[in-house]
Image (spheres, rainbow, N blue to C red):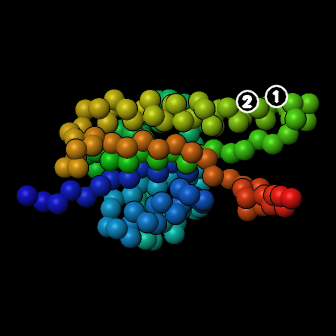
Amino acid sequence: MSKHKPVWFIAAASSGFGHEIALAALKRGHTVVATARKLERVKDLAEAGADILALDVTSSLSTIESVAAEVFEKHGRVDYLVIAAGFILEGAVEEVSRQEIYDSFNTNVFGTVSTIGAFLPLIRAQPVAPNGVRCTIVTFGSLGEAGEVAPAFPSMP
């Protein structure tokens, strides 16, 4: 019996945690499908052995479903569905535009839901992996300056 080689699908693998997860999975010999809005941003992952695809999680559901179908046609399954697309919108209500709020929700909420929705029927139809898990789905966004992520706290008296 052949050894199971996990398949990772990583939306927004061009930087941050998505990029680092892709590299770590590749180093373990896993199959990685790395996506970005612009393919030139994931060329280094292709050179490291990943399949790369263009994907914007705010695309139409039919576009994302086509990407999902392509991944399943080529790889037969997805063991890890990672959606690292997301960004922080900073500002008081009167400081941010309605378009900025829409863009934030479109990426962080609707894009995530659309991507999961496109992959989920295919994931549910795939057999359980040897580890007893059908698929792990992870969502997050990873954008911020080091100072924003870990601000300095004043000394306690």
Give the residue type that dot 2 points to.
Tyr
Question: In the rendering, which numbered label is found on residue 8?
Answer: none
Q: Is residue 17 left or right of residue 118?
A: right
Secondary structure of the residue carrying tag 2 is: helix
**Who's the residue at 68% across and 53% down the image?**
143
**Who's the residue at 57% across and 45% down the image?**
140
Residue 42 vertical position relative to residue 122 in the rendered view, above or below: below
State yes or no: discs 1 and 2 in contact (Cβ < 8 Å).
yes
- Give x and y (percent) for residue 107: 63, 37
**Who's the residue at 47% across and 44% down the image?**
138
Q: Which residue is mark 1?
A: 98
Residue 152 or residue 31, whichever sits in front = 152
Residue 24 or residue 155, whichever sits in front = 155
Report, in whole angstroms, how far the alpha carbon at label 1 lies from the one at label 2. 6 Å
Give the residue type that dot 1 points to.
Arg
Q: Which residue is mark 2?
A: 102
Q: Is residue 32 left or right of residue 99?
A: left
Residue 22 or residue 92, whichever sits in front = 92
